[in-house]
Image (cartoon, helix red, strand yellow):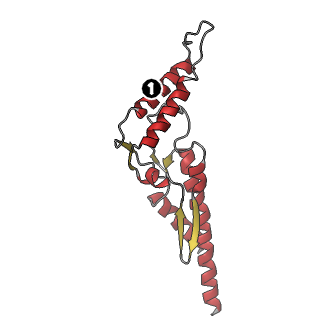
Amino acid sequence: MSDLDQQTRAIFQSILRDIQVELGDEFDQNFERQAFFSQAWQRRKSPTRPGGLILVDSGGLRQSVRSEIRESSIVFLSDHPAAAIHNEGGEIKVTAKMKGFFWHKYYAATGSFGRKKDGSLRQDKKNSQLSSEADFWKAMALMKVGATIRIPQRKFLGASPEVEAAVRAIIEENL
């Protein structure tokens, strides 16, 4: 292999590593931005975590995003079970097991109500939030098995004009 081929190969590998680092950081920042670059994610309708970040509950989805350099390309992927439905959007069918989970969450929410010494419910902000949360879980639990739940697309990985601009800038900088 000639010296020119080795230099070309080294520059190419450097470009791939730089793209991998830069885009990895940008895709991670999508979770902070709660958007795919400038395209904001649809707000959640569930009252279970008001004010919380969208798609960040345990952090498992965000931490599952990784990248691999394969020959002459970079692949970003996630093996998280919910990654595809969130990135692409779609519908899921309600199962009996899901209904059991919804009932469990309903009973957990109703057991958390703050009460006065006489046993009646306090009229405070936490109880009103718990009330709406309990109502949400009850509505979910009352859905029929086989009903569909629509999950909106909240893209966090993929191609976009911002990705292309970042790749172009890295290539120009390295050349």
Residue 14 found in image quarter: bottom right
Residue 43 visible at all: no
Q: Bin the neighbour count of mark 1 within 10 Å (Cα to Cα): few under 14, some 14-19, many 20 and up.
A: some
Decide which of 30, 165 is in the foreground and name it.
30
Classify residue 28 as left or right of residue 45.
right
Taking the spot 47% from the left edge, 24% from the top edge, the residue there is 132
Q: Position of residue 40 (x, y in %)?
A: 45, 44
Q: Secondary structure at mark 1?
A: helix
Indicate whether 30 appears above or below 109.
below
Q: Position of residue 171 (x, y in %)?
A: 55, 71
Classify residue 88 as left or right of residue 70.
left
Decide which of 5, 121 is in the foreground and name it.
121
Image quadrant in which the C terminus is located = bottom right
Taking the spot 52% from the left edge, 33% from the top edge, the residue there is 104
Indicate whether 158 appears above or below 104.
below
- Tell how many labels: 1
Residue 150 found in image quarter: top left
Q: Position of residue 12 (x, y in %)?
A: 59, 77
Q: In the displayed image of the protein, which residue is found farthest to the bottom? A: 1
Decide which of 41, 55 is in the foreground and name it.
55
Q: Position of residue 164 (x, y in %)?
A: 48, 63
Taking the spot 34% from the left edge, 43% from the top edge, the residue there is 146
Indicate whether 75 appears above or below 130.
below
Residue 124 visible at all: yes
Image quadrant in which the N terminus is located = bottom right
Residue 174 found in image quarter: bottom right
Q: Which residue is mark 1?
A: 135
Q: Which amino acid type corresponds to the residue marked 1 in the rendered image?
A: Asp
Taking the spot 52% from the left edge, 41% from the top edge, the residue there is 54
Classify residue 147 as left or right of residue 126.
left
